[in-house]
Amino acid sequence: MLFNSNRDFTMNSIFTALLLFMFSFLYYMIRFVEFTPIIFMAFIVYLVGMVLGIHLIFRIRYWLHDEHLTSQMGSFFTTWHYEEMTAIDYSKGLTKKDCDNYLGSTAALKIQFKSDKKKSIRISPEREEEFIQELFKRAPHLSYCSIEEYRALQVRKEEVAQQEVIVVPHLGDAVKAQNVGSSSSKWLKL
């Protein structure tokens, strides 16, 4: 089953800015640079890279096969087997350091793996709920956090961050801390 990548305003803005930069640089090269053989070769390499980059940006798809999930970015395909997957969660943001990103949106699904060799991946299918249902038909062993649970966890995480509690052993009680001074050292205002 085929799913195209979802797009959102943030990623579309980034892609548009990237395209404008690429085309303005191309215009600059054509108008103001004298073509020597080396410049001509650099121009050809730039054109090939530009076409490949545009192809990668605008052609992101996901296929759910019987035994594996396949991701396509441009002409490049990557396959992940269902038995190596352990969990699927929601994720937000442009990039995550422990993930490979195959997406066109800041809101994505994060798929985790058993093996330490493989990183987690982030994907952003257009029809998320249908994608998750189809994925569970093929890989029922996955653990899953629904969008409502995810949002509740995010709200709880923000509440805890706002109400930081520090236990001071010699006072015996928990004291609500207020940051005074630098972020590297915390002082308690009692």
Image (tube, rainbow, N blue to C red):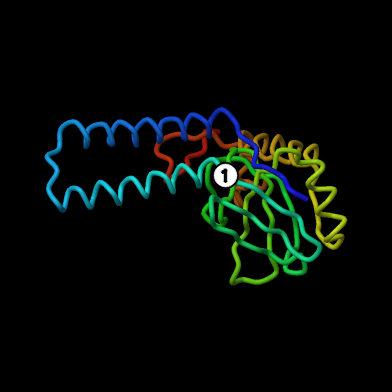
Location of residue 183 in the rendering, given as x and y in whole percent from the top left corner? 43, 41
Residue ID for mark 1: 59
Q: Nearer the viewer, residue 182 or 104?
A: 104
Q: Is residue 116 left or right of residue 19?
A: right
Q: Is residue 150 above or below residue 16?
A: below
Q: Is residue 134 left or right of residue 179?
A: right
Task: Write down the quadrant of residue 146 in the picture.
Answer: top right
Q: Is residue 107 above or below residue 85?
A: above
- What residue lies at 47% left-to-right and 40% top-to-bottom? 187
- What residue lies at 51% left-to-right and 42% top-to-bottom? 57
Q: Nearer the viewer, residue 127 or 122?
A: 127
Q: Nearer the viewer, residue 122 or 80?
A: 80
Q: Is residue 54 left or right of residue 157?
A: left
Q: Is residue 70 above or below residue 74?
A: below
Given the image, on which type of amino acid does mark 1 rest?
A: Arg
Quarter the C terminus occupies? top right
Task: Write down the quadrant of residue 75 in the picture.
Answer: bottom right
Task: Write down the quadrant of residue 176 in the picture.
Answer: top right
Q: Nearer the viewer, residue 40 or 86?
A: 40
Label 1: element kind: loop
- What residue lies at 53% left-to-right and 46% top-to-bottom? 95
